[in-house]
Image (cartoon, rainbow, N blue to C red):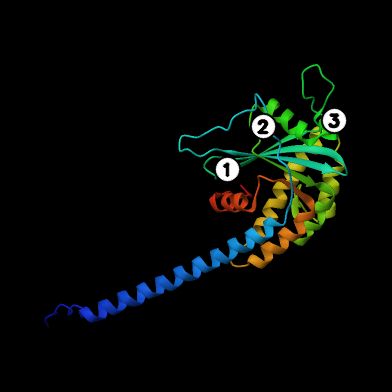
Amino acid sequence: MQLRPAAPPKKGLIEKVALFALVGLSVLSLIGVTLVTVYLNRLSDSTSALTRSEPMPAYVGQPQPVVAANGSSPMNFLVLVTSGNSLHSVVVANLSASRRNLTLITVPADLTVNSGSSQTLASTFAMDAAITVRAMEKLTTAKMDHQIRLDLDCLAGTIDATGGVQFGGTRMSGQQAVGTTRESTGSAAAATSAGWLIRAALISANDHFSVLDPARFSKTVDLVQPCLTLDSGLTAEVIQATLVESSVHPED
């Protein structure tokens, strides 16, 4: 018995398959663009409502931004963690120029701002938060691109809205996690605990944010709104661009 080679597929069939594949890809692309557009519009609307304060004015001797070889710059977010009207701790969130790494650096509130001086970050905050920002720039020799004030006392409700956090090896409610941070012994331990709490909250929030569910993101932003005060330079457009560029995974 002789084996004959299979007849080549008809040209018309190939063209039809290619056409259907092209239409399918076009539909999927259109759906993807629509979802991203809806998400970004919702993101912009939600973050526009966040409370904002005036940024610290430039001053002589202020550190200049570091520019990477690719032309982009790392971003430093100075997070002033407060409890009541007092400074609880300071966290510097450094987002790398590649937007792939986010490093949290914790600083105790009782750190002195000058050698041989009794003035601390907490005492500068009591006078004016802008003085605290300037002191941190002097201590780190790095420009703080944006300032965020985080009210520790109201963070519990936001954490509960995202299902609690994994904190200190234990699943905790917002009240438990915030209470643990507030009750830390010593300012250095309190600052470290605040950094871990922020990381845990970011992981929990990351599990709940989804391009496919912009409504959930909007609700979370609404819940966190009372806890945050951003400088006016941290606009909805800046937040949107930073989130789009970032490929940070908080659990890492």
Residue at 60% x, 52% y: name it: 237
Residue 10, disc: none
Q: Vertical placement of 66 versus 218: above or below?
A: above
Q: Which residue lies furthest to the left in this view?
A: 2
Residue under numbered circle 2: 58
Element assignment for label 2? loop
Residue underneath mark 1: 101
Q: How far, Cα to Cα, is label 1 from label 2?
A: 27 Å
Q: What residue type is labelled 3?
A: Ser
The picture places residue 216, in percent across and down from the top left corner, at: 68, 65
Q: Which mark is in front, 1 or 2?
A: 2
N-terminal of the pair, mark 3 or mark 2, is 2
Residue at left 60%, top 49%?
238
Read off the residue under disc 3.
Answer: 123
Q: In this view, does 100 lie to the left or right of 111?
A: left
The residue type indicated by label 2 comes to: Ala
Real-space Cα distance between discs 3 and 2? 22 Å
**SS class of the residue under badge 3?**
helix
Of callouts 1 and 2, which one flags the residue occurring earlier in the amino acid sequence? Answer: 2
Residue farthest to the top, as pictured: 116
Density class for disc 1 (Cα within 10 Å; few <14, some 14-19, many ≥20) is some
- Residue at 66 percent across and 35 percent down: it is 144
Q: Report x, y in % for residue 186.
A: 85, 33
Q: Is residue 73 found left or right of 226 in the rendered image? A: left
Residue 164 appears in the rendering? no
Residue 83 x, y percent position in the rendering = 85, 43
Q: Nearer the viewer, residue 87 or 21?
A: 87
